[in-house]
Image (spheres, rainbow, N blue to C red):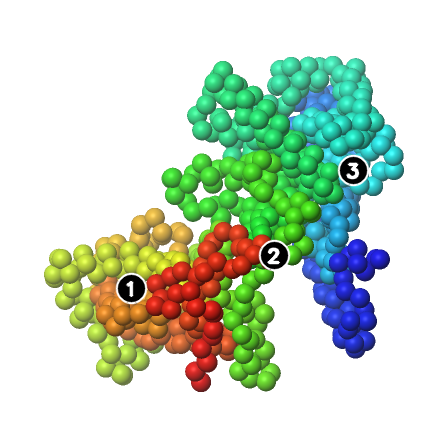
Amino acid sequence: MANEERGGRPAKAFPAAAVGDTGSRLHTVRLGLWLLAAVLAVRQVAAVLTTPRGERLTDLATWLGHDGGPQADGSLYASTRFTGTPFGGLVLRPLTRSAEQALGWGWTFGTLLLVAALGLIAARALPRPVGRRTATLAAPVAISLLVLSLPVRTTLWLGQTSVIPVLLVLLGCFVARGQRAGGVLTGVAAALQPALLLFAPLLWSTGRRRAAAASGLTFAAGTALAWAALPRDSQTYWVHHTAGAGLGGRADDLANQSLHGALLRLGAEGPLETGLFLLIGAAVVALALRRAVRYARDGQLLLAVAITGCAALVVSPAAWQHQLLWVLLTAVGVAGRRASDRPVWPVAVVLVMTLPATTIVPNLPLLHPVRDNTVLLAALAAATAVPFLPRTSPYFRTPVPTRYAEPVPARFRHVPLLPFLRRVVTRPNLLLELLLIRVTYTAYSKVRLAATGDSHTQGRARAEEHAHRILDLERLLHMDIEYAVNHAVVEIGWLRNLFDFYYTSFHFAVPLAVLGLLYWRRPVDYRWARASIGFTTLLALIGFWLYPLAPPRLMPGLGIIDTVNGVQDFSRPDYGTLTALTNQYAAMPSLHFGWSLWCGLVIALVAPRTWMKALGLLHPLFTAAAIVATGNHWVLDAVGGALVVAAGFGLAYLFQGPRARPQVAADTGTGAGPGPGTAEPKPSGPFPTQGKPVREEPARK
């Protein structure tokens, strides 16, 4: 019964040795994940405690009054930096004095213990049935994600108490025995963060009416107690600041990820903003509670709690970064009928909650409303829009499987094929691909910049020394054509403009276009091409790190003209808005040429027409001419780019096997696949063999 409930298979279906090996591997993975969680926790604590005292746990000072004395010496809201309720100040303030005297050690470790408890409860509350692997690994994974999340990191850094309300709600819903005890815990959480009173109607609608009544009475009693003990602060919080609005900073600050803050950032003010806030907030609450009740009755109580918490964030007057943990808990929801769609929501949530918004959303004026409200949009989506599957759905346990090409033997005995590079013949989820491409490119930019110590000015002498060596080698090989080509192009205006445009515009546009076309028309080849360009870029980053190289245009005394940015002052080079954002000494190998060569080879391999293949191969030739003519690369940089491209294709072949080449691209649709027992749709595409079964051609040796 236990095995079936957990979703496992009977032990007798496997040989004893296989079961033992699987259990041993699972135990090893579990230990590794716990070690990772411990390392991350120690790293976060060390980052806080090694910071000078005046720069860490700064929000603790807001609890201590003007001179750090008892409550009578000052108001909680004297500086408007304190964002908690009067009840929170009354109950938790005595703890802060000892925390401050202990230099924050006790407070920081205490907060870390609360985070660990939160992760353990969330792992235990996963909706049943839960597989053995998930049950074993859920706790360390949950704690690691919580420690990495921006809300927890901000809480540890500032010395905030925002983990406590979330933990109290989870304790009330999943740990407390009896409805009254659970309701009291939820009511205390609401007294600390008033928007959490939304859990009372959730409890009432799911049949826990005693818990709902207890939570409401506890909230009222706590608020009344605080009003009696701190009348001036209660007047300030509930009347003057309308349940905390305006405390802790400007309401339109980017850190306020509530609906109120978003409307102010979008320009709504006065009665218009108030009306929109009330109207949209009421709609969000009604829809979110309806969804939460449905999932709670379906047995997914943790998801129901997370959805309600997201709705509370939306309708709060202020939802600061340290209060946004509810969004991370929605990662437990199952969304998508296809197996390839399942990772989309958890990955998006983890990225939103662990990375800055500028990392996820490009810095384009058109996308600024999205970038400025990333967490709010995620909370809105979780509360009202994401179609989480009920447990009664046939796709909940058995999604439409991903189809793979027939497996091939490893290239070498001691180099196994990588499981995550399996040769998939179906189109991946577009949103997931865009998220991963964006984050990968941001990481690439950071590593490229860090190759000379996070500054384009550091390592200049070393980069110039390497450039002299490259030039000497080119002279030995009679390849030093940079000066002649550069000055010849400068004399011809239209040709100079053509090469400048080609250099600045085609570097990103062509690879993205190739990937986009492969994704849409040739999903089988898309996986293979993506792996090869990924390996190519990784090898190039290693080259940037190990061998910083000054391009010809930044070499004093050579007379090379920077045709794109003009003549440079080599002590303070200026190449536009990218001066402080890019590493100009990342020249070897040339990814301008490398990516263009990758495009040319991919087009030559997959294009159906000869003229298309020839046109694709012209692109690296034009790029090679452009990088030399504009003074941005040496000829040997292009040779280095060609080498990393060859190595990239070689590594893809080594770890993935030969390119899967079915006659037809299977399952080219991007929507949900057919359900159990439903016939597969006929494939469509630009191939002359449309409608035939998928069959992989023999791999060429």
258 up-or-down from 134: above or below: above
633 up-or-down from 375: above or below: below
- Quadrant occupied by the C terminus: bottom left
Could you tell whether 70 is left or right of 333 in the image?
right
Could you tell me which secondary element the residue under label 2 belongs to?
loop
- The residue wearing badge 1 is 632
Could you tell me which secondary element the residue under label 1 belongs to?
loop
- Quadrant occupied by the N terminus: bottom right
Mark toward the viewer: 3 or 2: 2
Q: Real-space Cα distance between discs 2 and 1? A: 56 Å
Could you tell me which secondary element the residue under label 3 belongs to?
helix
- Sequence-wise first label, 2 or 1: 1
- The residue wearing badge 3 is 173
**Residue 415: x percent and y percent?**
58, 80
- Whether tag 3 and tag 1 are in contact, CB under 8 A, the answer is no
Q: Count residues near mark 1 (Cα–Cα under 10 Å), then give few for <14, some for 14-19, many for 20+.
A: many
Q: Count residues near mark 2 (Cα–Cα under 10 Å), then give few for <14, some for 14-19, many for 20+.
A: few
- Circle 2: residue type: Pro
**Residue 504: x percent and y percent?**
28, 56
Residue at position x 31%, y 80% from top?
473
Mark toward the viewer: 3 or 1: 3
- Circle 1: residue type: Asn
Residue at position x 75%, y 36% from top?
169
